[in-house]
Image (tube, grey):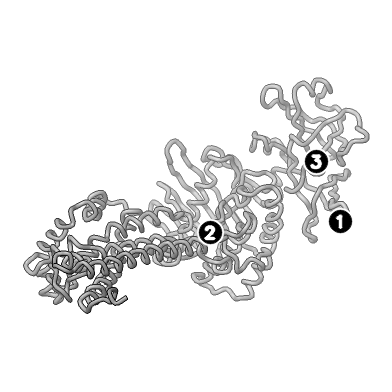
Amino acid sequence: MTLSFQAKQRLGVFELDAEFTAGPGVTALFGRSGSGKTSIIRLLAGLSRPAKGHILFDGDVLLDTEKGVFVPKHRRGFGYVFQDGRLFPHLTVEKNLRYGMWFAASQRKSTQFSQIVDLLGIDGLLQRRPANLSGGEKQRVAIGRALLAAPRLLLLDEPLSALDDPRKAEILPYLQALRDEMRIPIIYVTHAMAEIARLADRVIVLRDGKVGMSGDVDMLLNHPETVVEMDEGRDAGAFVEGMIADHDDRYGLTTVMLGSQRLFVAGTFPAETRMARFHISARDVMLATRRPEEISALNILEGRVESLRPTVPGVVDVQVNCGGALIISRLTQLSCENLALSPGKDVFAIIKSVSFAPL
Amino acid sequence: MSWFALTDSEWVALLLSLRIASVATLCSLPLAIITAMALARGRFPGKSLLNGIVHLPLVLPPVVTGFVLLVLFGRRGPIGAFLADHFGLIFSFRWTGAALACGVMGFPLMVRSIRLSIEAIDRGLEDAAATLGANPAWVFVTVTLPLMLPGVIAGAILGFAKAVGEFGATITFVSNIPGETQTLSAAIYTLTQVPGGDAGAFRLTIIAVVVSMVALLASEFAAHSINRRMRAA
């Protein structure tokens, strides 16, 4: 599957001028609010029409403003999961789920219905009305409804952003299962690093309506500075990847090998997962020059300061190399000077295990 | 209770009123839905003019509306003559004319109620239906129409109640012919004009109150049950 997108559009002072291609797997469109993510996904779905643009999906021209081609939204065959779910309030959950099946060109078998219902864990909700569902349940039904319409491509517009953390943790495993089992290409719009870490194969970074950078998620693992640059806001941090070594069911902890060091992570992963990827927020990492004792934090990693990078006045992002993995710690200028941090200095990075959970 | 027994002519007036009101409501309802859609969603030149025309019967004296209908739909009126010649549809001094007058008078009430319910619909739901493969006609039938149903039902019942009570436009347009155009209101009016007619007028008044009350309760009940289904407890 290949999708190529190119469009120019002006909406008041905001100008969208973006061009990208996407392949199979999960492609994340990342950016802050107002960066143009939702505009792009709406253009893909045919919900709006740009002044100039071209959209090609597997050789199928969906939009070509020069030739006057515009395939209307109901003939694109793209599933769309909206931020707010948008379930039909006058239909039961089951009728919501079956809505798109009426129109799907290739009739889905009823086995597929039960398969998707099982996958999303919504079989107990079928006779309920959307008004009686929790936010997380609504979003799972919305995902199931989009899937059952047999889409060629699934567009997810910040499907977790309207939910609180426990609800996010509830849906994320379903999204991972969806990615691994359904083999439908996904465009995933988000502004949360942690979601990219868990789900995305490729990432396209948007800034002020333009594509800033794009590439495999591995690019973010190897270049923490790009992660900082991508998101200068509260969410700055580093991506790390490690092999899952052990599960401790009693404490609900997972051990992940980060190079030679072990990292305890709160929460569990699907059984077949071998590699785990996380986003460690810079705000959750403390530094010490001596190994702290009698401290509640489970993770104390040995490392060496690589660089110091001032962000806003009084705040410094310290990059620490912990056995090959680069971690970022956000400290005040004062702490930096108290510890006399400078490149090459040996330090201990302290990370609370719960700061990884649930995302 | 013998004083309450309706005379034959009173029965005729009541049944005629119900028939006229039903026909007026059913025939104008589809047109009211289309007009409400155009006013709520459409963007076209002359929209405020259309809005004004739709609301005219609400603000004009009913007699004026009746006279305009007489001029347009009478046997020699431009529309009346055309319909009589081509479709054999005659309005003047027929019960059909009374239904037309009642339909016109109730039309603004229906349009207002339906329009409000259309404007309350989240357009995002229609987008969602379209991304699931529904073409615009299916979106209308499966999403828009069910969601505006409370407004449609409320509008239809309001229009029906208005039609049962209509007097001025009807009597001006099609006169007051017992058994043909003499509706409940016209019969009450006639009874008050003759000596000894008070008892009959009183009986019909009670019936008018009951019909209107039942209509209002039915509309409340319908709106309530639909709301409960959608928003659920």
Distance from the alpha carbon under mark 1 to that under mark 3: 26 Å
Helix, strand or loop at label 3? It is: strand
Q: Is residue B111 visible?
A: yes
Residue A249 bears which disc, if any? 1
Q: Position of residue B119 (x, y in %)?
A: 40, 53
The quadrant where residue A219 appears: top right
**Chain that bears disc 2:** B
N-terminal of the pair, mark 1 or mark 3, is 1
- In the rendered image, residues at marks 1 and 3 fall on the same chain: yes
Q: Which image quadrant: the C terminus of chain B?
A: bottom right
* Residue hosting label 3: A325
Q: What residue type is disc 3 on?
A: Ala
Instruction: Say which chain tag 1 marks.
Output: A
Tell me the tag on residue A60. none
Horizontal side, residue A108 vs residue B158: left or right? right
Per the model, the C-alpha gap separating discs 1 and 2 is 41 Å
Q: Nearer the viewer, residue B47 or B138?
A: B47
Provide the chain ID for the residue under circle 3.
A
Real-space CA distance between mark 2 and mark 3, rounded to the nearest whole angstrom? 51 Å
Q: Residue furthest right?
A: A293
A263 or B213: nearer the viewer = B213
Percent from the top left, x then y, of residue A300?
87, 38
Residues beneath discs 2 and 3 located on the same chain: no
- Looking at the image, do the residues carrying marks 2 and 3 touch, with CB atoms under 8 Å apart? no
Q: Residues within 10 Å of mark 3 (few under 14, many from 20)?
A: many
Viewport quadrant of the N terminus of chain B? bottom left
Q: Give the secondary structure at mark 1.
A: loop
Can you tell which of label 1 and label 3 is closer to the viewer? 1
Q: Estimate the x, y position of residue A185 in percent, counting from the top left.
A: 61, 59
* Rendered residue at 68%/52% (across/down): A167
Which residue is drawn at the image coordinates 38% and 54% (left, top)? Answer: B116
Q: Which mark is residue B231?
A: 2
